[in-house]
Amino acid sequence: MNNVIEISHLTKSYGKNRGVIDVSLTIQKGDIFGFLGPNGAGKSTTIRSMLGFLKFDEGEIKILGMDSVKDHVEILKNVGYMPSEAWFYNSMRVSDVIKYAADARGLDCGKEAAKICERLKVDTNKRIKELSLGNRKKVSIVCAMQHKPKLFIFDEPTGGLDPLMQKHFFQLINEYVDEGATCLLSTHVLSEVNKYCKNAAIMREGRLTMLESPKIDDETFLSFYEDEEDR
C-alpha cells in the first residue's frame, strides 16, 4: 500500500464560520508531508476529520487503506497524533502520563519511551504542573511516538521547543520514517518544511493548494497570505 492518506473532496462547514472546502490530498508511504497555513486556515479541521473526531459534510477519507468513519478505532491504533494543545492532568507525574498513554493502547512501550525521553531530555519525575510549555510539548511527543505507529500526525509540534530539541525531534521523525513510517506535519513555520519535508501543501481560507516543491522562498510563501488578504 503506497497511499497512507487519501482525502477526496472533503468539505466541513461550521455554518457562518469557515471550515474546509473540497479538499483532496494524497500522501504516500515514507513521506514527511508539510501542511502549511495560517491559524484558522483549516489545517486542524482537516486533521480532526481524518481521525474521526469531526463529522464532515461531504467527501471521503481513507487512512492506511481504511475508512475514516467506519474504521475509526482501528485507524487510531496505528496513528500517533499530537494535537497543537498539550492537555494533561496537572497533578500526574510525567512518567505516569506516558505509561497511561501506553496502557490505553494495551501496549508495553517502556523501552521506546525511555529512548525518546533520553533524546528529548524529558524529566519523568516532575509533575505536569511544574512543566513549561516546551516540556509539556515534549511529553506530548513521547506519547505520540512511543508505540512506533505507522502514521505520525503532528499539529504545530515545535512551539516552545528550543532549537536543539527541535533538531532532536526531527531526527527522531527521520529515523521512524526510515523504518517505514509516514509523517504529516502541520505547521506555519516555513523553515521546518523547507528543511525536513519531502512534499507540501498550503491551506488558505479552507482550500488546499499543492506545492510543486516544499523548497519555497519567503517571498513566494508570503504571497499566499497576501493573496488571502486581498480577497
Image: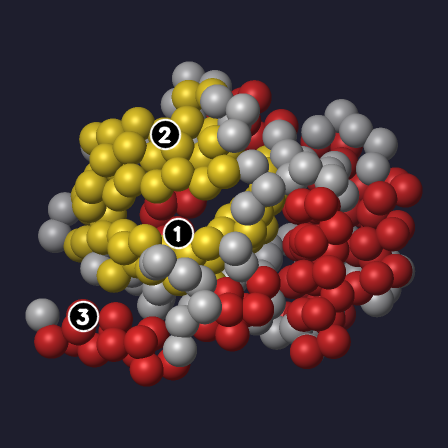
Is 188 situated above or below 154? below
Q: Nearer the viewer, residue 164 or 142?
A: 164
Residue at the front extreme? 212
Query: Between marks 1 and 2, how big is the CA–CA gap?
Result: 15 Å
- Residue 156 in percent (x, y) is at 51, 62
Q: Amino acid at mark 3?
A: Glu
Would you name the residue on which mark 2 appears?
A: 61
Which is closer to the viewer, label 1 or label 2? 2
User: Which residue is at 76% across, 25% downward?
Assistant: 106
Mark 3 or mark 1: whose residue is earlier in sequence: 1
User: Which residue is at 26% across, 43% downward?
Assistant: 23
SS of the residue at dot 2? strand
What label does residue 228 carry, if any? 3
Let me know if residue 65 appears in the view.
Answer: yes
Q: Nearer the viewer, residue 76 or 203?
A: 203
Is 204 situated above or below 230? above
- Residue 72 in percent (x, y) is at 48, 24
Marks 2 and 3 close (CB-CB < 8 Å)? no
Q: Quadrant of the N terminus?
A: top right
Mark 2 or mark 3: whose residue is earlier in sequence: 2
Would you name the residue on which mark 1 appears?
A: 44
User: Which residue is at 41% across, 27% downward?
Assistant: 62
SS of the residue at dot 1? helix
Query: Between marks 3 and 1, how big is the CA–CA gap?
Result: 18 Å
Let me know if residue 186 appears in the view.
Answer: no
User: Which residue is at 25% across, 76% downward?
Assistant: 223
